[in-house]
Amino acid sequence: MPVYYFTEQGYEKLRKEIEETERILKKDIAREIATAREHGDLRENAEYEAAKMKQSSYGAKLSSLQERFANARVIRKGDLPDGIVTLGKKVTIQEVGKSNKITYSILGDGETDIDNGIISYQSPLAKALIKHEIGDEVEVNLPRGLKIFKILDIGFFDE
């Protein structure tokens, strides 16, 4: 079974998403199906078919979320080593030969938010940076080509 890593906030967000998906399945979609059944012949009832498809889709989503929850591991600051890029760290890098600095937090898949500088530990950039220290230059094969980044700073994701 795969392991899914989350911060405490990400784990709580996943738990709430499971609760909301269960609520939609048990209440909203169940009500839609009941209403559609009242319209008569189910073989030619597009509203009923649409509600059943929605139920199937949400059921699959719930199953996937529950699997992630069951195999989740929460990362805590005290469990992470200092001075090394790992899951749960915030890392500032600079492309060699360029002046702009970029800071990313490396978190679990369910917490990825590139607009806010949060990348998955499974992304090519994070995989290349993990296990390196401040001052290291790291080659990363990205979709836009091979890049070399220097690690300028490493901290914890919530600092």
Image (cartoon, helix red, strand yellow):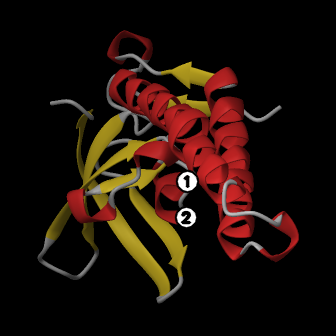
Task: Name the residue at 66% across, 51% down.
Answer: 33
Quarter of the rendering occupied by the N terminus: top right
Q: Amino acid at mark 1?
A: Lys
Percent x, y of residue 4: 62, 34
Quarter of the rendering occupied by the C terminus: top left
Q: Amino acid at mark 2?
A: Pro
The residue at which mark 1 appears reads as 127
Q: Using the image as rendered, state which of residue 82 and residue 36 is in the foreground.
A: 36
Does 94 sit left or right of 13 as displayed? left
Percent x, y of residue 154: 26, 39
Percent x, y of residue 76: 39, 16
Task: Name the residue at 49% across, 41% down.
Answer: 108
Q: How many marks?
A: 2
Residue 22 appears anywhere in the view: yes
Percent x, y of residue 137: 39, 61
SS type, badge 1:
helix
Does 52 sit left or right of 142 as displayed? right
Label 2 to label 1: alpha-carbon separation: 5 Å
Does 102 sit left or right of 81 as displayed? left
Task: Name the residue at 28% across, 47% down.
Answer: 91
Farthest-out residue, top: 78
Task: Name the image quarter holding residue 101.
Answer: bottom left
The residue at which mark 2 appears reads as 124
Task: Name the image quarter holding residue 67.
Answer: top right
Contact flag, marks 2 and 1 (Cβ < 8 Å): yes
